[in-house]
Image (cartoon, rainbow, N blue to C red):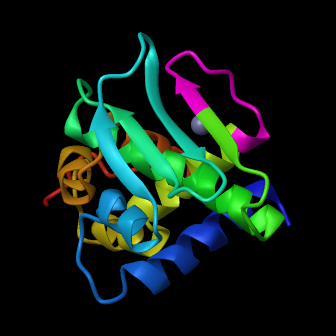
Amino acid sequence: MLIKEAARRAAEDTLATHWRGRDFPVDPFEIAANMGVRASEAPLEDGTSGMVISRLRTQPVIFVEESETRPRKRFTCAHELGHFVERTETLGDLREGFAFVDKRTSKTDAHEFYANEFAANLLMPEDAVRRLEDEGCTLIRMAGYFDVSVPAIEVRLRRLGIRLVPAASC
Ligand SMILES: [Zn+2]
């Protein structure tokens, strides 16, 4: 399966299990807690936006840089959760322990690609994006609806091949 598809499916499964019947915006911190991961804000080292750490016999933790904007913190939390899900799904257990540290300048490898796709699908599921598109929503309204940054919804729309009509009405 393509990484993109695997990440999408994992995000959909996560929503179905941990956010069923709930409304938008999706709360990745609450989903993390439901999955047994303690996610919180903290002052991180310069240039670090987030990290996920899973050690033997301890509760996995996610930290996101506290000085970021709320939409960015939400996306980073979902991104770190993506690393956690990929790692736990791939290995099937947590015997090894692992850690990912994300710098703002991190280069994109397969794991980063997976984590970003997971986060986008978790916070902005395709069916919901298309529904807002049908309703004629503007970029700003969509960003507000999903509580993501404008650049995040722009990337999401581009990747879904969606072009908003200029005369949006919602
Ligand atoms: Zn990452």
Rendered view: 68 above or below 125? above
Q: Percent position (x, y) of residue 26?
A: 30, 65
Q: Residue furthest left?
A: 170
- The image quadrant of residue 45 is top left
Q: Quadrant of the C terminus?
A: bottom left
Rendered view: 48 above or below 81? above
Q: Residue at x 31, y 45 (%)?
A: 40
Q: Percent position (x, y) of residue 151?
A: 37, 34
91 with respect to 105 (left or right): right
Q: Out of 132 and 116, give the one closest to the viewer.
A: 116
Q: Residue furthest front?
A: 57
Q: Out of 99 and 68, give the one closest to the viewer.
A: 99
Rendered view: 132 above or below 16? above
Q: Percent position (x, y) of residue 121?
A: 50, 61
Residue 157 visible (yes or no): no
Q: Percent position (x, y) of residue 116?
A: 57, 45
Q: Is residue 103 magenta?
A: yes
Q: Out of 91 and 113, give the one closest to the viewer.
A: 91
Q: Residue at x 47, y 84 (%)?
A: 16
Residue 46 visible (yes or no): yes
Q: Residue at x 55, y 28 (%)?
A: 102
52 with respect to 135 (left or right): right
- What stretch of residues is rendered in magenta? 101-111
Q: Is residue 135 magenta?
A: no
Find ligand 1 in the image and state its quadrant.
top right
Q: Residue at x 30, y 23 (%)?
A: 43
Q: Residue furthest right?
A: 1
The tally of labels here is 0
